[in-house]
Amino acid sequence: MSTVDSIDVSAPKVQTTGFVDYFSSIEQQKLKQEFLDGKRPEQCYQCWKVEDAGGRSKRINDNQVFKDYQFDIDYNNIKSPRLLNLDIKLGNKCNLACRICSPRCSSTWSKFSKKQSIEFDWVDNKTSTFWEDLIKISEEVKYITFAGGEPLLDKSHRKLLQYFIDNDLSKDISLHYNTNGTVYADFLFEYWDQFKLVELSFSIDNIEKQFEYERYGIPWDQVDFNVKKYSQDGKYNVNFFSVISALNFYNSYNLYSYAKTLGLDVTFSLLEDPQELSIINLPIGVKKKITEKLLTTNDNLFIDKVNSFISIMNNQNEKYNFLDYLAEQDSLRGQQFSEYYPEYFKLIAQEKF
Ligand SMILES: C[S@@+](CC[C@H](N)C(=O)[O-])C[C@H]1O[C@@H](n2cnc3c(N)ncnc32)[C@H](O)[C@@H]1O
Ligand code: SF4
């Protein structure tokens, strides 16, 4: 469903055509037709991979999120301009340089990469058709997802929230933020309180010292404090969104248990890139140990959530040596993998890549 009624308004092609025109483009119509024909468009490979392993993909999760609107959409009309969900990457301004990320999404990452990072600010970009497009579809929109960069560092999107408030539309719109948890955004509360619902998904893949290695740039205590504060406030929906990679799968139950003590849900998702950090690269002996460790937690809800990742890990092999990949970044960041993950490092060191 997400492919036929929602759009990522910061995807490169959208930036040149504007998102209204792009949504009714031949390219998008073809994509929708492929779904109607029961095909599996190759652009959606991440979801097929997770579904084939028996997991819940983003596609399936989104169908659940948007279920109240499923009968309002004429799926057979591939030319329909109706847009329910906007997925907006506000820019790439970010205070962290997470190991799994890149300069494309984070301005801080450019310190650690030869690839040039261009800072961009989509909402304030005067040459784009963003505002024109937004006004055209504003009465249809029911969900807005903000990512980035770090969306809670972006003050310009208050203009966007204000637009929906001024036009008496905000009470019908839910906001979703993917956030790194470094910002307690009380400066946004007066806006958020005028929307139907606000959901904060904390992108946290590990806890404590290992968090500081993986999501480089902030002490764990500060993020822990913010998550607890948002959660205790009880005003907004709070949960975790965690990316499974070769760095954190071994200790994924630690994160799950942390979330459980706070009464919060965790959605696990599969790393897209860099390929070097994928769980399929792990040596067979390490894969066995991870499988054993996770399946003996005796926590069925957790096992249900990670089973498809275990199957992806065990059914595919790659040859990247992820320790070599990390070493280059370690030297630039003054960190050492072995210090942050002593037990896991020992396990990997015993096995050959
Ligand atoms: C790029 S971030 C931007 C929003 C915000 N800064 C944050 O981290 O939540 C959006 C989401 O993509 C996830 N992400 C980052 N790198 C990824 C990767 N290589 N593969 C899959 N998801 C990734 C993040 O964990 C986050 O949940
Ligand atoms: S916080 Fe988000 S945007 Fe920033 S580096 Fe991490 S994943 Fe990328």
Image (cartoon, helix red, strand yellow):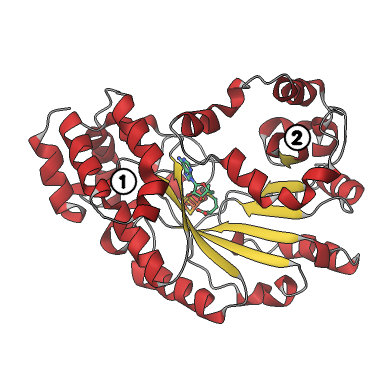
| Residue 73 position by quadrant | top right
On the image, which quarter does residue 246 sit in? top left
Q: Quadrant of the N terminus?
A: top right
Secondary structure found at label 1? helix
Residue pointed to by mark 1: 249
User: Which residue is painted at 30% across and 42% down in the image?
Assistant: 329
- Would you name the residue on which mark 2 appears? 4
The answer to whether the residue bearing label 1 lies less than 8 angstroms from the nearest atom of ligand 1 is: no
Image position of 1 with respect to 38: above or below: below
Q: Is residue 123 visible?
A: no
Dot 2 alpha-carbon crowd within 10 angstroms: few under 14, some 14 to 19, many 20 or more: many
Numbered marks: total: 2
Locate the C terminus and report the quarter of the image it occupies: top left
Q: Position of residue 136 (x, y in %)?
A: 91, 47
Tell me where residue 313 appears, x and y as whole percent: 32, 32
Mark 1, other Cα within 10 Å: few <14 / some 14–19 / many ≥20: many
User: As displayed, is residue 315 above or below residue 260?
Assistant: above
In front of the other: 74 or 24: 74
Instruction: Name which residue type carries label 2.
Output: Val
Of callouts 1 and 2, the N-terminal one: 2
Viewer-closest of 302 and 255? 302
Q: Position of residue 311 (x, y in %)?
A: 35, 33
Residue drawn 87% across and 29% down?
77
Separation of residues labelled 1 and 2 (CA atoms): 33 Å
